[in-house]
């Protein structure tokens, strides 16, 4: 009987100790278990742009005494790794040379302010742009800055009259897009001169290959032209084949010393329905307006629920900057040494 009593006492003591341990552990709300997955191996800046990185690495967490604590929120995106993981298989892509770094950062700030978190790749087209962008995005789990591997471009804003320089930058983007599509990723390419008011991703749902803005009201694909500066592409066989041909035509023209706009080549293929038929969804012009429309006082009075504004037809950096500031849409304080 005495031995039974001793065992009962020991059991009660052990149970109490275990209960206290569980209570103590449950109160440690900041502890995060070490992530075990990753999207892809991290690559260095001189590799082929992919837009993916090791998003579940432990450097994106605050460490204390060897433990992983709360995840870091990016200073440029205000997003954590967990936020990015909620939108798997999607990459937003943009590019900038030094002349447009401030415009690109302003766009990213507008994305941040509406709370959109997406795996974002920014391709820097020159070394100074890369250094400056990396300064702002360093340690940000949502923003991946990569330097182009297809030849650096001018740091200044090139004139449209200098086709080989101006369109040389524009005509490189399709190869970046193709690299991502071939990895099975959905790609939103956004020019840096966009401003986001609401989350656009709900408008990219449905059965289509490419979602894009048109320049006219007609819904007949062969009778309209489209803007390639804000475009959502799904990695379907049709999309990949289309973009491959797009890239090949631009490369062939470049070898001949010709620099047609990427947009004109794209529209030529769509009009001819070549090399394959592409299922197009046209974005609503009132939700995704051009800059000239958005900044029109009469249009402003109509109170449209703008999602993303694209200042594509506001020519030149100074004019874009002026309009952004005039309408209270300039959100950053960035200076560059480029000669505009």
Image (cartoon, grey):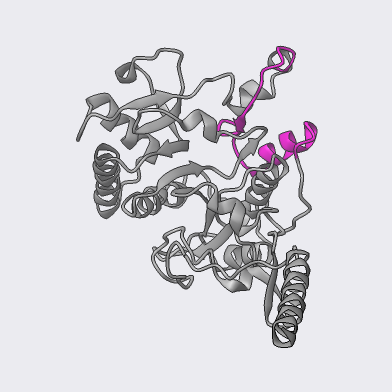
Q: Which residue sits at x=29%, y=40%?
A: 236
| Above or below: residue 9 compared with residue 244 | below
Q: Can residue 2 be seen in this view?
A: yes
Q: Which residue sits at x=70%, y=53%?
A: 78
| Above or below: residue 1 compared with residue 43 | below
Q: What stretch is highlighted in magenta?
A: 300-329
Most extreme residue toward the front is 1
Q: Is residue 261 visible?
A: no
| Above or below: residue 146 compared with residue 226 | below
Q: Seen in the image, is 318 located left or right of residue 259?
A: right
Residue 64: which quarter of the image? bottom right
Q: Seen in the image, is 147 located left or right of residue 27?
A: left
Q: Does the magenta stretch include residue 308?
A: yes
Q: In the rendering, at what x and y percent does residue 334 appear?
A: 75, 56
What is the number of callouts on the image? 0
Q: Nearer the viewer, residue 120 or 195?
A: 120
Q: In the rendering, at what x and y percent does residue 65 appear?
A: 73, 83
Residue 292: which quarter of the image? top right
Q: Nearer the viewer, residue 81 or 291?
A: 81
Q: Which residue sits at x=25%, y=45%?
A: 249
Q: Which of 307 and 173 is in front in this view?
A: 307
Most extreme residue toward the left is 275
Q: In the rendering, at what x and y percent does residue 12 appear?
A: 75, 75
Q: Which of 71 and 144 is in front in this view?
A: 71
* Quarter occupied by the N terminus: bottom right
Q: In the rendering, at what x and y percent does residue 230 appear?
A: 49, 36
């Amino acid at each position: 009987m005495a031995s039974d009593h001793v065992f009962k006492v020991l059991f009660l003591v052990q149970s109490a100790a275990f209960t206290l341990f569980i209570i103590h552990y449950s109160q440690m709300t900041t502890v995060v278990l070490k992530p075990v997955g990753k999207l892809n191996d991290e690559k260095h800046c001189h590799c082929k742009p992919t837009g993916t990185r090791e998003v579940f690495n432990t450097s994106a967490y605050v460490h204390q005494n060897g433990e992983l604590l709360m995840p870091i929120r990016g200073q440029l995106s205000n997003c954590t790794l967990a936020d990015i993981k909620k939108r798997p298989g999607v990459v937003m892509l943009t590019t900038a040379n030094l002349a447009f770094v401030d415009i690109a950062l302003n766009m990213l700030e507008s994305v941040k302010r509406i709370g959109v978190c997406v795996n974002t790749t920014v391709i820097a087209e020159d070394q100074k742009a890369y250094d400056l962008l990396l300064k702002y995005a360093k340690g940000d789990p949502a923003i991946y800055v990569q330097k182009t591997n297809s030849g650096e471009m001018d740091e200044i804003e090139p004139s449209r009259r200098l086709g080989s320089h101006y369109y040389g930058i524009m005509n490189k983007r399709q190869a970046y897009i193709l690299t991502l599509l071939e990895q099975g990723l959905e790609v939103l390419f956004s020019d840096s001169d966009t401003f986001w008011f609401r989350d656009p991703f709900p408008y990219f749902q449905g059965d289509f290959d490419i979602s894009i803005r048109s320049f006219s009201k007609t819904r007949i694909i062969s009778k309209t032209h489209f803007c390639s500066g804000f475009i959502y592409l799904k990695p379907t066989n049709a999309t990949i084949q289309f973009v491959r041909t797009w890239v090949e035509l631009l490369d062939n023209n470049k070898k001949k010393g010709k620099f047609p706009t990427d947009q004109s080549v794209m529209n030529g293929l769509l009009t001819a329905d070549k090399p394959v038929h592409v299922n197009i969804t046209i974005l609503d012009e009132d939700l995704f307006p051009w800059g000239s429309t958005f900044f029109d006082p009469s249009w402003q009075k109509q109170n449209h629920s703008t999602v993303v504004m694209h200042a594509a037809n506001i020519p030149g950096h100074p004019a874009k900057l002026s309009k952004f500031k005039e309408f209270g849409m300039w959100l950053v304080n960035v200076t560059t040494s480029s000669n505009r």
